[in-house]
Amino acid sequence: MKRSLLLGVLVLAHSLSHAQTAPSDSAPNVPLPPGMIRIFNGSNLDGWVLEPMNATTFSGSDITNVDVLSTKLIDKPDAVATYVSEQLDEPAQQALTRRAPSTNSTRELRSTLSKSLTKIVSGSCIHDAARFKAVRLRPETHELLKASPSGHDLARLNRLLLEDAFPDELWQSPPVAWTVRNGVLASLGAGRGVIYTRQSFDRYRVIFDVRHVSGNPDHRAGVLVFCTAPTDGEQPLDALAGIQFQVPNGGSWDYRKGKNNGGKGLFTRLVKPNFDEHQWSRVEILADPATGTGRMAVAQPPGAKAIEVLRFIDPTAGRKGPFALQMHNRGLFDEYANIAIEETPAADELITTK
């Protein structure tokens, strides 16, 4: 199925059964500096690519009631439970037989079952009319089932079928990872992933407004520079192997292949601000691939004078690539607005700090 058609199907299904409560206010109405070109139009996702579009694999946290799920897989009370139990790999079967009421055992069981469920959804279509006769399917599941999907879309269908069959035991993932509402580009907590610009940039300045609405308190809203865009048919690198700036208070990470660490010695935290991440901030990032330099300044509220918070430098990291917003982990709800870029800026300095 073509990606654009699938996205339309998912958005329709989202409006029917997964609508999120809109925030009480819309995007900040603060003018952008002269010379900035908007790359998010406030109405749709034109010019942006979601990766992944939605959840197709399971993590341990996606199993919301491991005790009940385990009991069903052991007792096999219905056709779907019987089928899934028979498809579990050997490690999952063994984990079920030795489950015990302890924290370590529960953590191990979640991890082992999630890996086995991922193998199941990554295989052939699990739907059978008789098997799922008693299961109430969501609109998104119905639409994908009618489309006879393959590849990523088939894995998504299989995951949805399991979610529908075990609604109280498995997290009900949203049909798309990001959405647009009230002029805001918002994450939907669908799982770890990114949304990135279809266009790649050389030296640039990007300015945007951001706030963290809710979610895991251990994970910040994050953006990525010096990203590696996947080619057609290529599996994307984790976080596009980019350099992460956590906004607004300046955490960081280096996702390059062979790195995947905090980038010790490469990031400099110039100040340790205490911005309220739940309020709108205006962020400016200046990225120069030639020198591998990234600089971040933050103003709260938008329109106030910014301060430089974080600086990164590593000439080996610099590369032309897309700019990306990162959903750091499942269950994070972040909002972005007024995203604009100035390519090859005349001034090699932060302008919001003036």
Image: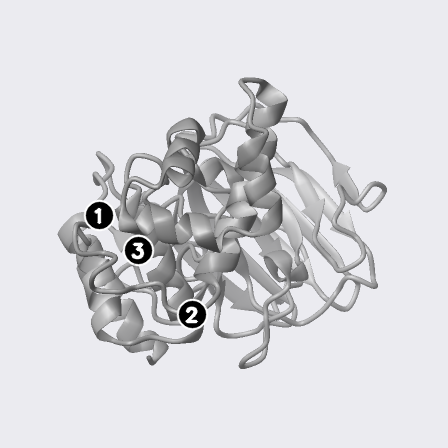
Label 1: state its secondary structure: loop
Q: What amino acid is found at the position of numbered circle 1 in the picture?
A: His
Question: Percent x, y for residue 172?
Answer: 32, 44
Which residue is tagged 1? 18
53 or 255, which is in the foreground?
53
Residue 170 horizontal/vertical position (percent): 37, 40
Which residue is painted at 19% across and 53% down in the image? 138
Q: Can the viewer see residue 194 in this picture? A: no
Residue type beneath disc 3: Leu
Position of residue 276 measured from the top left corner of the image (x, y, whole percent): 47, 25
**Residue annotated with mark 2:** 124
The quarter of the displayed image where residue 39 is located: bottom left
Q: In this view, does 3 lie to the left or right of 92?
A: left
How many residues crowd around disc 1 within 10 Å: few (fewer than 14), some, or many (20 or more)? some
First-in-chain label (1 vs 2): 1
Q: Quadrant of residue 111?
A: top right
